[in-house]
Image (tube, rainbow, N blue to C red):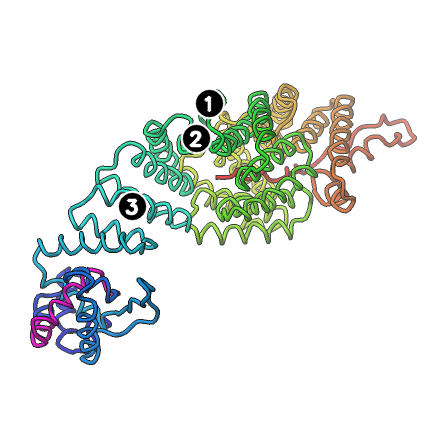
Amino acid sequence: MARADGNAFYLEELIRATAAGRHEALPDSVIGMVQARLDAEGQQARRVLRAASVFGERFSQGGVAALLGGEGEVAHVGEWLELLSTRELVARAPGGERRGGIIDLEYTFTHALVREAAYAMLTEEDRALGHRLAGGWLEGVGSTSDAMALAEHFRRGGEPARAVRWYERAAEQALKANDLSAAIERAELGLSCGATGEAAGALRLVEAESHVWRGEFVEAERHALAAASACVPGSAAWLRALGSALVSAAKQGKLDVVEEVVGRVSDAHPEAAARGAQISCLAWGATYLIFGGRIAAARRAHGLVSEISRGLPDLDPQAQALIQQVRSFRASASGDLGGCLAGLESALVSFEIAGDLRNSCSTRANLGYVYCELGDFARAESALRQALAETARMGLHELAAAVQHNLGRVLGLRGQLAEAAHLERQAIASVQKLGEPRVEGVARTYLSEILAAGGDYAGAEREAGLAVETLRVAPSLRVAALGALARARLGRGDAASALAASSEAAAELVALGEIEEGESSVRLTHAEALAQNGADAEARVALETARERLLARAARIEELAWRERFLNDVPVNARILALASQWSAPPAPGPRPATIERPRRPTGTGPIRLPPA
C-alpha cells in the first residue's frame, strides 16, 4: 500500500506483480505512468530528477549540481529543486552540510515511485557515469560517513578497485555495530570487486571474526587462515587473523592447532604498535589451553603475556580485559573462586571501556557461572537470562547455546527441572550444528544431572556416557562427566559399575592435579561409591580429602558472606560437610559394628564456566 501511494491503479498493478512473483521490480505500467508525470515537468526538471535519483531517496543540492556540470550549476539546481518541491515531487529535508562557507541543502523524493521512475529513465551508460561521479564527489567533499553508499557508487560506476576500500570500511562498521550478517555480506562484495593483498586480508579478517561470533567455526578458521596469509607477518592484522584461527580451532576441539598457533605468535617480534594484538592472541591461546587441560602450555603463554605487557604501560583496554580474563580462568581452574570473581569483574569494566559489547556479554555470562558456583542461584539466573537476551539481539549463536546450557544447570539446581532439561537439549542441538564438542559434552553432563534429579537414572546414564565420549577433546571436563556417570549408576543401584566410573574419575583428577570444575562432586561421588561397595575405610579417607580440598578452596574466598554461601548453599559442598561430620562421629554403643550410612541419592556439580566466543 505504501508503494502505491494511495493510487488505486498503482495498487492494482502492484498486486498483480506480486501475484506473478515480481516482488521487487515495479510493473512497467506503473513506471510508465510516473514517467509520464515527470515528462510533463519539462526537460530540465527531468535532468535534475535523474541526477538526484543516482544518490538514492535522499540527496543534496551540491551533489546534483556536481553530476550536472559542477559548482556553477548549484544556484540553477537550487531553483529547480525548489520548484519541484512546490510540485510535491521532492521535499526539503532537515539538516545539511556546510561546504565552502554555505549550507548544502538536502532533499528527499516525496515517494519511492518518483525516485525509481527517474532512475529508470537513465541509460546504462548514464547510470554508470552518474554513480562514478557521485562517488568521486562524495569523496572529494569528505562525505565519507556512509562507506556502503560510496562503495556501491564505485561498483555500479564500473570502478571496482575504488570500491574495495569502502567495502572494507563498511564491513568493519557493520562488525563493530554487531550486524554480523551485514559484515559478512559487505566483505564478500569487497572480495568480489577483486580485492588483493592486505585489502583482501582485511576483508577475510572481518569475515573470520563474524563467523566466530556466529558460531560457524569451520568457515571462521578457513577465512582466518586466508586472512593471515594475505597480511604482513607480525602486523596487527596478521595477529588478529591468527587469533581468530586459534579461537575457531579451539571451539572445534583442535588443541594441537591452538598450540601451533600460540607457538607462531610467541616467536613473532611485532613492532610496538602491534604488541597489543600479540597480547590478545596469546591471551586467547592461554584461555583455551586452560579449558583443554593443557596447563603447562597455558602457563607458558600466560607468562609471555605478562612479560610483554610489562613493557607496554599504555596497554589498550581490550588487551587489559583479556589479560584479566586469563587470570580469572587460571584462578577458576585452580579452585580460586575469589580470584575468578575479581578477575571477571575487572575484565568486564575493561571490555565496556573498550566498547566491546560482545565480550562484555560473554563476561556477564561468566559472572553468572561464578555466582552459581558461589551459591547465589537467583543472581546467577538473572545474569544468564540477561546474557541470553543480548545474544539473541546480536545474533551470537554459539554464545547463546553456551548461555542456555549454563542457565539450564542453574534452573536444575533451583528445582525447575522441565525448563532446565529443555534448555540443555536446545543447547545440545545448537552446538551439534556448530561443531563444538566441548560445549556439547558439558551440556550432556548437566542434562544427566537434571535427569537424575528427576529420577530418570537410565536417561542420566545415557547422557553422561555420551558426555564422556564427547569430552575426550577436553580431559579436564571429562572428569566431571565420569562423575555424573557414576552418580547415575548409583541412582539405579549399580554400585559396582558406579565405583568403576568414579575410580577412573578420581585417578584422572590426581593425574591432572586441577580441573576446570566439578572437583567436589567427583570426590564426593567416589566416596559414596566406595561406601556403597562396603569399602568404609577408603570411603572415609576419600571424603576427608574432599572436605579438606573444599575448605582450602573456601579459604581463598576473601569475602566472608560469599564463603559462607559457597560452603552452605551449594548442595554438593553442603553434602560433603554434612557427611564428613556424620561419618567421623563415634560409633553408637552396642554389639553391632559401626557402618557408614549408604547415600541414596546422587549429588550434583557446579555449573561450568562459559568460555568466551
Q: What segment is highlighted magenta in the picture?
A: 33-57
Is residue 202 shown left or right of residue 60? Answer: right
Q: Earlier in the sequence, mark 1 or mark 3?
A: 3
Image point 68% across, 48% down: which residue? 376
Secondary structure beneath dot 1 equals loop
Front-most of residues 469 and 245: 245
Amino acid type at image mark 2: Leu
Residue at label 1?
Answer: 268
Marks 1 and 2 sit apart, C-alpha to C-alpha, by: 9 Å
Marks 1 and 3 sit apart, C-alpha to C-alpha, by: 30 Å
Please tell me whether residue 78 is drawn above or below residue 364 in the rendered image.
below
Q: Residue furthest right?
A: 589
Disc marking residue 167: 3
- 46 magenta-colored: yes
Marks 2 and 3 sit apart, C-alpha to C-alpha, by: 22 Å
Disc marking residue 239: 2
Front-most of residues 208 and 430: 208
Image point 62% across, 24% down: which residue? 505
Amino acid type at image mark 3: Tyr
In percent of width and height, residue 514 lies at 64, 26
Front-most of residues 249 and 481: 249
In percent of width and height, residue 118 lies at 13, 66
The answer to whether marks 2 and 3 mark residues whose Cβ atoms lie closer than 8 Å is: no
Q: Earlier in the sequence, mark 1 or mark 2?
A: 2
Q: Earlier in the sequence, mark 2 or mark 3?
A: 3
Secondary structure beneath dot 3 equals helix
Please tell me whether residue 339 is drawn above or below residue 86 in the rendered image.
above
- 291 magenta-colored: no
